[in-house]
Amino acid sequence: MTMSRSPARVVPGPLARVSWAFFDWAAQPFFTLVTTFVFAPYFASALTETPARGQELWGYVTAAVGLVIALSAPILGSVADASGPRKPWILAFSIPFVVATWMLWYAAPGSSMAIPIALLAFGFATLAIEFATIFNNAMMVDLVPRARIGRLSGLGWALGYAGGLVSLIIVLGLMASNPETGKTLLGWAPLFGLDAVTREGDRASGPFSAIWYLVFVLPMFLFVPDAPKKAPLMQAVRKGISDVGTSLQALKDEKGLITFLLANMAYKDGLVALFAFGGIYASGQLGWTTIEIGTFGILLTITGTFGALVGGRLDDRFGPRAVLLGALAILMVCGLGLISLDRTTVLFVVGVAPGTGEGLYSSLPDQIFLALGGFIGAAAGPLQSASRSYLVQLAPPDRITQSFGLLALSGKVTSFMSPLAVGLVTAATGSQRWGMSVILVFFVAGALLLKRVEARG
């Protein structure tokens, strides 16, 4: 008597893996252009009365979005595990993302509705793309053997950084201009007659991100195989909601996973705040314009691309935990260095001559900020890439999407705390430096927890 065997799993080819990674390429310009280097500094410098007030409001919205994601992500992950396919969910969240991102164009200086439009559109776009990312991440386990998850994750982050870099060069070189000169980074007049006075080049970062996403997300939909259907939608919803409580209870038996989720909770909070406020901080503390902030972003994305690629290989060789600890050490040192700078001071107390104003980054604080930012970019990619590959190692194999929902939960359940802390401390002290300093606490807490993570037995 012979026993039947289930057919061997067919591993998708390189086209599917690269197409999956192109989701990061498609989504990253929103984070690069809107969240960090172009629109956020524009919001703080042109729409609010002071950069500190802009940092405060941006922090409150980022905190609110984080809370919504924290409450929703595990349920969505559980529903997807029960229903099977992930692409329909990605499509469902892609539509509001594109609409909300496009709406940023209408946040024009002088408009009484500019601040509400900017904050609401940013909040809804962030919510939608974060949800879509949960389902894209969960597709990794069907694309490569587990031993190569780190490299695939690193490829995705590297393509994401590269997409952010290319989009940033396009926007700075051809669209966003200096309000004083009316010229772009390349010294040209903006494309399409974009007006420098009303900051149309900065506002165009929203529609540009929407169009970019629409074009480059297509390979994922066309060439990446989806999981088979398991249950009808409403049945999956009921099962998914019921499974969340069961899974949270089961975490008590997954000590390594729960400790990692707590660590991820802490250091992702710090990373969210660092990228949400980095451009705003440089604008207020160093007086950087869109061109200077954007050029800084180009450097950061270049180092981030190489960091993600190298981090993926180090992940496969030494394990994601070692990569995470190394990245956190870099972020702590460089974060401390950043908050020690202002226009006339380095290392908190050492006075320096102000810049000449001739050319970019003419002062020593500018140059140190630039160098530290390069190291931050190189560390941030591996930190995020190794987080999702470590999750694959620690998660129960039959609850992978739900576990990515829990990863999103741990990355978001208190992610309102770091932006909120930045906003509150900034408001209380009137100091961007003191507001940003709270980020370091989250990195330290994450590293201490990560050292206690135990592998699954």
Image (cartoon, rainbow, N blue to C red):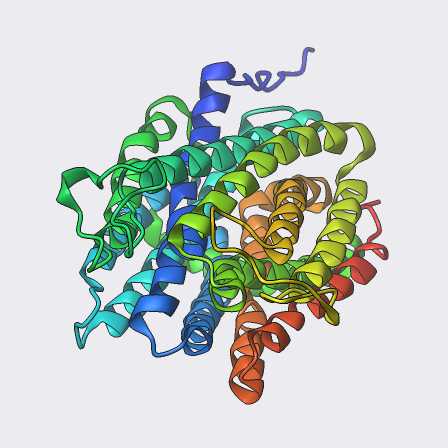
294 with respect to 247 (left or right)? left
Residue 415 rendering spot, x and y as whole percentages? 56, 67
Residue 123 rendering spot, x and y as whole percentages? 36, 64
Residue at 65 percent across and 46 percent down: it is 371
Q: Where is residue 270, by image quadrant?
A: bottom right
Q: Quick one: which residue is furthest to the bottom in this view?
A: 428
- The N terminus: image quadrant: top right
- The C terminus: image quadrant: top right
Work out whether residue 24 can be spotted. no
Residue 87 to residue 248: above or below:
above
Residue 304 to residue 364: above or below:
above
Residue 50 rendering spot, x and y as whole percentages? 40, 77
Residue at 67 percent across and 57 percent down: it is 264
Residue 149 to residue 109: above or below:
above
Residue at 72 percent across and 40 percent down: it is 393
Q: Nearer the viewer, residue 124 or 455?
A: 124
